[in-house]
């Protein structure tokens, strides 16, 4: 009892030494804690259980769980997961290191316009292959957006060879063929030759490229793992949503509503904007990431418009330039990976991080005909939850705003230190143009005429009209 009195006295002394106008009111409610008797505790327990309709209820006795724990690798749990993760990703780490230590061959000057994969040899010759038989690849895919979601061409490179892939309908100039979604339209990257072998494929936003790889739709698929330079960049030097907005505004010199509001808030709080952090990061697109890590010139993205707005015929006429454009993205991705991969390992040295990234990059979702129904249901539930959340936030915001009257927000322990300054809102009245004003007067005239005509029809006395 004496210790509890001393503890309360110390708490009160601390509040008196460091006064706070918003916590003083709680001192009045403080009382010394007096131990409750067993009977009082039981009454409190009974009251609490009754309030939840749990008092005097039969409960189910759960049997004790008894199972054999798996073998522990190492001397503790930390070593256990390190050893398991390193065992899972050690081979892939070595294959990734090959791309960082080795350079790519020179880009081919002329590309083969043939269906499927073509390998470019060191002596300048080309060889038709079923897939790039390499342990480490940098990979990029292009899609003709206006006509299909299927891939039209792709390039890949390893320290040994360059590879290119062309869709059969592109070679035949058959635009209608792009609409036939079959596995044969997908890109093979591996083949079961008495067992799958480990392979690393690097790309920027590689999940998009992976969606066009044929073997990734097999239930018992290959041991290929995908490493995404965009995801690694976000983890090392990425921007948050608000930072990306500020970066774009500073780069373009625009003054959006969000930027103006931020500047106004900093002005009220006497805060100076700090932009040094912009030099330590970059947005997520390949061109900005390449400039950030490699200090290179911006990538030429003008040719990309053919994939976004062009036709099969236009693509066929520019296939050499478009293939070189795709290969340039492979080169840029490789150079980014050479710098980013060591930084990523330094920032995240634990093998579980790499093992988790590789595993998440190889996941898939089996689908059937109910997929569209699932999307519609999920969208409907999302919209309902969104509306419900907005209603709740509106209610919470209104309740908080009501505390402004009489400065009652100062008594709230969560809201008292927020910015409660008031801005005078001015509503701008847009003057009507001459045409709109004339139309408005005509509508008023028509309405008054109809009312007068109606009065004559029902014989309303003149003095009552």
Image: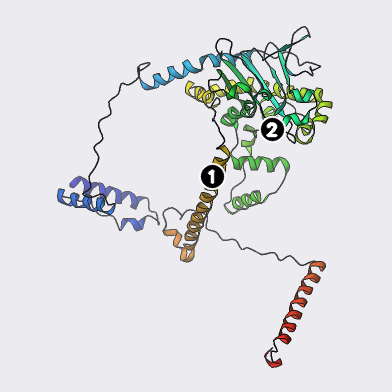
x and y percent of residue 348 in the render?
51, 24
The residues bearing labels 2 and 1 have C-alpha atoms spaced at a distance of: 24 Å
In x, y percent, where is residue 285? 67, 32
Residue 412: x %, y % from top left: 42, 57
Numbered circle sitting on residue 377: 1
Q: Which residue in the structure is indicated by mark 2? A: 149
**Vertical arrangement, residue 202 with respect to residue 192, above or below:** below
How is colour applied across the structure in the image? rainbow
Secondary element at image label 2 = loop
- Residue 410 occupies quadrant: bottom left
Instruction: Give the camera-side residue of 334 and 344.
Output: 334
> As rendered, which of 50 and 93 lies closer to the eye?
50
Instruction: Please state if 106 lies on the left or on the right of 202 as rendered.
Output: right
Quadrant hosting residue 164: top right
Could you tell me if residue 23 is visible in this image? yes
- The reply to whether dot 2 and dot 1 touch (C-beta < 8 Å) is no
Q: Earlier in the sequence, mark 2 or mark 1?
A: 2
Q: Residue at x 55, y 11 (%)?
A: 195
Position of the C terminus by quadrant = bottom right
**Residue 339, above or below 60:** above
Question: Above or below — where is 304 with respect to 221?
Answer: below
Q: Residues within 10 Å of mark 1 (few under 14, many from 20)?
A: few
Can residue 294 be seen at all in this image of the molecule?
Answer: no
Q: Secondary structure at mark 1?
A: helix
- From this view, report whether residue 120 is shown above or below residue 217: above
Q: Could you classify mark 2 by the number of other residues whose Cα lies within 10 Å: few (under 14), some (14-19), or many (20 or more)?
A: some
Give the camera-side residue of 62 and 429: 62
Residue pictured at 75% horizontal, 14% vertical: 106
Label number found at residue 189: none
């Amino acid at each position: 009892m004496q210790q509890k009195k001393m503890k309360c006295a110390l708490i009160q002394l601390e509040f008196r030494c460091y006064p706070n106008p918003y916590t003083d009111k709680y001192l009045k409610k403080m009382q010394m804690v007096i131990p409750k008797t067993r009977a009082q505790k039981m009454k409190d327990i009974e009251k609490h259980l009754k309030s939840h309709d749990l008092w005097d209820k039969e409960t189910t006795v759960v049997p004790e769980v008894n199972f054999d724990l798996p073998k522990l690798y190492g001397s503790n749990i930390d070593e256990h997961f390190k050893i398991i993760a390193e065992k899972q990703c050690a081979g892939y780490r070595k294959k990734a290191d090959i791309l960082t230590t080795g350079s790519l061959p020179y880009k081919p000057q002329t590309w083969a316009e043939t269906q499927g994969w073509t390998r470019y040899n060191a002596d300048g010759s080309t060889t038709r292959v079923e897939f790039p038989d390499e342990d480490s690849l940098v990979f990029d895919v292009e899609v003709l957006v206006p006509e299909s979601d299927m891939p039209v061409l792709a390039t890949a490179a390893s320290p040994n060879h360059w590879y290119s892939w062309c869709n059969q309908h592109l070679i035949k100039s058959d635009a209608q063929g792009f609409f036939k979604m079959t596995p044969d339209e997908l890109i093979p990257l591996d083949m079961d030759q008495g067992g799958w072998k480990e392979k690393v494929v690097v790309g920027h936003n590689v999940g998009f490229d992976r969606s066009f790889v044929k073997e990734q739709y097999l239930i018992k698929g290959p041991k290929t793992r995908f490493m995404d330079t965009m995801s690694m960049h976000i983890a090392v030097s990425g921007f948050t949503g608000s930072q990306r907005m500020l970066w774009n505004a500073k780069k373009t010199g625009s003054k959006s509503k969000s930027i103006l509001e931020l500047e106004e808030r900093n002005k009220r709080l006497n805060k100076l904007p700090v932009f040094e952090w912009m030099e330590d990061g970059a947005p997520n697109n390949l061109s900005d990431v390449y400039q950030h890590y490699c200090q290179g010139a911006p990538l030429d993205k003008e040719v990309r418009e053919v994939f976004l707005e062009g036709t099969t015929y236009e693509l066929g006429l520019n296939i050499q330039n478009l293939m070189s454009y795709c290969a340039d993205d492979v080169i840029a991705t490789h150079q980014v990976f050479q710098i980013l991969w060591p930084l990523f390992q330094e920032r995240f040295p634990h093998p579980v991080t790499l093992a988790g990234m590789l595993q998440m990059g190889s996941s898939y979702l089996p689908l059937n005909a109910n997929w569209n129904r699932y999307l519609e249901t999920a969208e409907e539930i999302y919209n309902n939850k969104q509306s419900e959340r907005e209603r709740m936030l509106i209610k919470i915001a209104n309740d908080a705003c009501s505390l402004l009257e009489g400065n009652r927000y100062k008594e709230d322990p969560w809201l008292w230190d927020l910015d409660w300054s008031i801005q005078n809102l001015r509503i701008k009245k847009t003057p009507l143009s001459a045409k709109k004003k004339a139309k408005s007067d005509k509508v008023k005239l028509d309405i008054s005429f109809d009312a007068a005509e109606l009065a004559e029809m029902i014989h309303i006395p003149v003095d009552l009209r």
